[in-house]
Image (cartoon, rainbow, N blue to C red):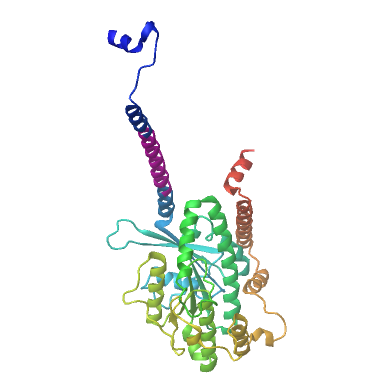
Amino acid sequence: LFRSLKCTLGRGGGLRRPRVDPARRCRSCLAMAARVKKKDITDDLSSSILSKLTEEHAQKSAEEEFANDVTILFCGAKKSGKTSVVDRFINPTKDEKDQPKPTVALDYKFARYASEGSSSKVLAHIYDLGGDEGNDNLIGVPIAPTTVANLVMAITIDLSEPHTCMQVLEKWLKLLRHQIEKSVQTFAQENPAGARRLEALQALRGSAYAEHPDRGLINPFPVPLVIFGTKWDVLAADADPEKRKNLCRALRHFALVNGAHLLFLSLKEKASMNNMRSILRQLLFGVAPKGGLPEQLDHSKPICIGDGKDSVANIGVPPSGQTSDRAWRELVEHMFPDPTSLTKGAKRSDADQVGEELVKYPESSIDGMVEQRTEELQQYRRQVERNQRLASEGIEGSKVSVLTAAA
């Protein structure tokens, strides 16, 4: 204490500030500054690490959300073989003579697959859309913001009716692309982390065509797409070889410009059915076929070609000399005119014909059940349309339904 007072008392007993060595003072300041800087750096580092871990966790959660689930939608004209393809993918031993029942509205099946060395199974949700035109609005069920991150599309065209191929294919390409793009936009707003993953996948699909000689013509589909040409055996037996060749070239063109797989099928052609199962296993479960997918471009045999494997040089150009959707469509329409356009009167749909026949044979119990099921289907369609409209406005239809019921 005495030494402390002695240091602080000056002459005459007045107080004075203790002398501090300037070098020592400088070292103290530097040490203090270093401690503050180190603390700030540690806080910044901790903050950056935490934010990075949080971001990675969100990204991982988004990926895991869809890692074990994949959705595929089969669509196309009525009686084009959608259900037959689905059944023989799920059950390869199914006999070719087994004829499935016509699909009413939207049918659902599933398939599971466990890869080697994995304890978890991938679940494939398989939707089969009925071919009636009134079912088109049901594509919003399988193509939704909750499924678009892991989605596959399959369009079936009936080669036994070649005059319908272009119309059916272009119709579904337009409808599906529009619905997918709308779902992607909603998904990006609701799930930013998942949206980044989806953008990366779409960028990867686009980059696959960066070195393609026809990259200027190709507009890749937003999700993996496969085009199935069914009943190949009927086309091969009935169509003129030159006409068949031009139809095949036209379908190859549409598959090329949309970045799609193209595969012709026949229940009687075992090799074509094996190719179908191989390509679906690859798209749904990521299982690449052993030795790769066999490429078949001979127009006298079932076509089989993967996305991005074809080219305008291999396909050729239509007689007009211009490679375009319109040129190929007009060529096919010229070679395969619609038989109904050559007859008087418009062709009635199967539903109209059946409805007229049922009126002739009334049965109260059956008619009542048909009326009830028709009303239930209409209610379901209205509910789907309502949920889609609310979703586009940022409102969940389920919540609105609950609130309405509570009120």
Quadrant of the rendered image containing residue 183: bottom right
Instruction: Give x and y (percent) for residue 58.
Output: 43, 48
Residue shown at the point (47%, 54%) measured from the top left: 194
Q: Is residue 48 left or right of residue 104?
A: left
Q: Is residue 6 magenta?
A: no
Residue shown at the point (40%, 73%) measured from the top left: 279
Residue shown at the point (36%, 8%) measured from the top left: 11
Quadrant of the rendered image containing residue 70: bottom left
Quadrant placement of the C terminus: top right
Instruction: Give x and y (percent) for residue 257.
Output: 53, 77
Residue shown at the point (53%, 83%) measured from the top left: 160
Question: Which residues are drawn in magenta?
Answer: 34-55
Quadrant placement of the N terminus: top left
Q: Nearer the viewer, residue 266 or 200?
A: 200
Instruction: Give x and y (percent) for residue 326.
Output: 62, 82
Q: Is residue 37 left or right of residue 220?
A: left
Q: Is residue 337 left or right of residue 297?
A: right
Q: Is residue 371 above or below residue 217?
A: above
